[in-house]
Image (tube, rainbow, N blue to C red):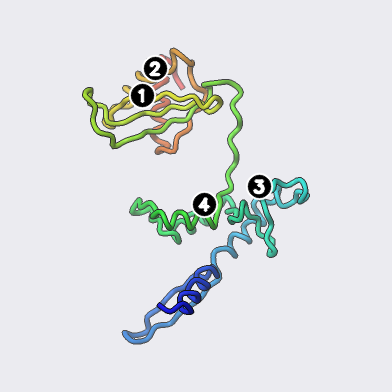
């Protein structure tokens, strides 16, 4: 490919246009150019309370990570601040190659592209006041099976101190087994948590919480 042609393609890519090709016949096609989703982000930023709060701040008091572009769009370290709008977020993920129906995760290059262009605005988590009252949990799965049959690691982290426990588990454990393990390894050392956060299915967290209450002989 000639250098000029490559430069032109690079310029088109950086212009943030969306291209759609509609075939009129086997030999003829039309090219339609539409403004990128950036226009919708700008429109929805005007109704997002968190974003408007930042925009209303005096420039000298605003964190240096936030910048306002010439056309009035709030950015964070050069990335677009995406309003807290579920439909808009889904649209951006779909544009990046994510398919919820297929459960497909974007490839690395696509994910990095979205990360460079956009930043979700979310409500910040409150800082815990006491250790081991607010925890997070996740799993490292797909590990080689140990002599005792464990193939996963259950990671439980205290949000305040960042101390963590790494518990050997199996992916086929029933929920009451997780609750019993948590009672034996965590509760007797740190007490009962006030909140549990996880990026797993919300059903997992809810079911685990119920199982933990049953293990303690209490009712929700």
Instruction: Tell me which numbered mark, 2 or 4, is placed earlier along the sequence.
Output: 4
**In terms of image quadrants, where is residue 204?**
top left
Which label belongs to residue 91? none
Q: Are marks 3 and 4 in contact (CB under 8 Å)?
A: no
As measured in the structure, the alpha-carbon distance from the residue carrying label 1 to the one carrying label 2 is 8 Å
Residue sitting at x 33%, y 54%? 102
Report the residue marked by disc 1.
Answer: 167
> Is disc 4 placed on a helix, strand or loop?
helix
Specify which label sits upstream in the sequence, 3 or 1.
3
Of the two numbered discs 4 and 1 in the rendering, the one whose residue sits closer to the viewer: 1
Q: Which residue is mark 3?
A: 50
Count the marks: 4
Q: CA distance from mark 4 to mark 1?
A: 35 Å
Which residue, given by chain and number where applicable, does mark 4 sit on?
86
Q: Who's the residue at 42% across and 57% down the image?
A: 109
Q: Specify whether 68 is left or right of 168.
A: right
> Height in image: 112 above or below 161?
below
Q: Secondary structure at mark 2?
A: helix
Q: Residue 185 bears which disc, if any?
A: 2
- Seen from this angle, which residue lies furthest front? 3
Q: Nearer the viewer, residue 76 or 219?
A: 76
Give the percent coordinates (x, y) of residue 182: 39, 20
Q: CA distance from mark 3 to mark 2?
A: 40 Å
Residue 129 picture quarter:
top right
- Whole-angstrom CA distance, mark 3 to mark 4, is 15 Å
Q: Measured from the top left, where is residue 67 in percent x and y?
A: 68, 54
* Rendered residue at 67%/60% (across/down): 69
Q: Is residue 186 above or below residue 201?
A: above
Where's the N terminus, which quadrant? bottom left
In three-dimensional space, the C-alpha distance between marks 3 and 1, rounded to whole angstroms, equals: 38 Å
CB of mark 1 within 8 Å of CB of mark 2?
yes
């Amino acid at each position: 490919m000639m250098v000029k042609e490559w430069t032109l393609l690079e310029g088109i890519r950086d212009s943030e246009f969306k291209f759609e090709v509609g075939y009129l016949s086997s030999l003829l096609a039309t090219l339609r150019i539409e403004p990128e989703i950036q226009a919708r982000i700008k429109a929805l930023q005007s109704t997002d309370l968190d974003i408007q709060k930042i925009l209303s701040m005096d420039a000298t008091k605003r964190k240096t990570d936030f910048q306002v572009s010439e056309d009035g769009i709030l950015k964070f370290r050069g990335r677009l601040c995406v309003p807290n709008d579920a439909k808009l977020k889904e649209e951006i993920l779909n544009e990046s190659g994510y398919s919820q129906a297929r459960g497909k995760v974007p490839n690395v290059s696509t994910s990095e592209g979205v990360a460079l262009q956009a930043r979700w605005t979310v409500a910040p988590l409150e800082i815990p006041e006491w250790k081991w009252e607010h925890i997070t949990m996740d799993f490292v799965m797909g590990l080689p099976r140990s002599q005792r049959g464990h193939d996963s690691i259950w990671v439980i982290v205290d949000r305040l101190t960042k101390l963590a426990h790494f518990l050997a588990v199996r992916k086929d454990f029933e929920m009451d087994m997780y609750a019993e393990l948590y009672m034996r390894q965590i509760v007797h050392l740190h007490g009962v948590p006030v909140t549990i956060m996880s990026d797993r299915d919300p059903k997992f967290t809810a079911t685990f919480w119920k199982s933990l209450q049953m293990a303690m002989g209490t009712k929700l």
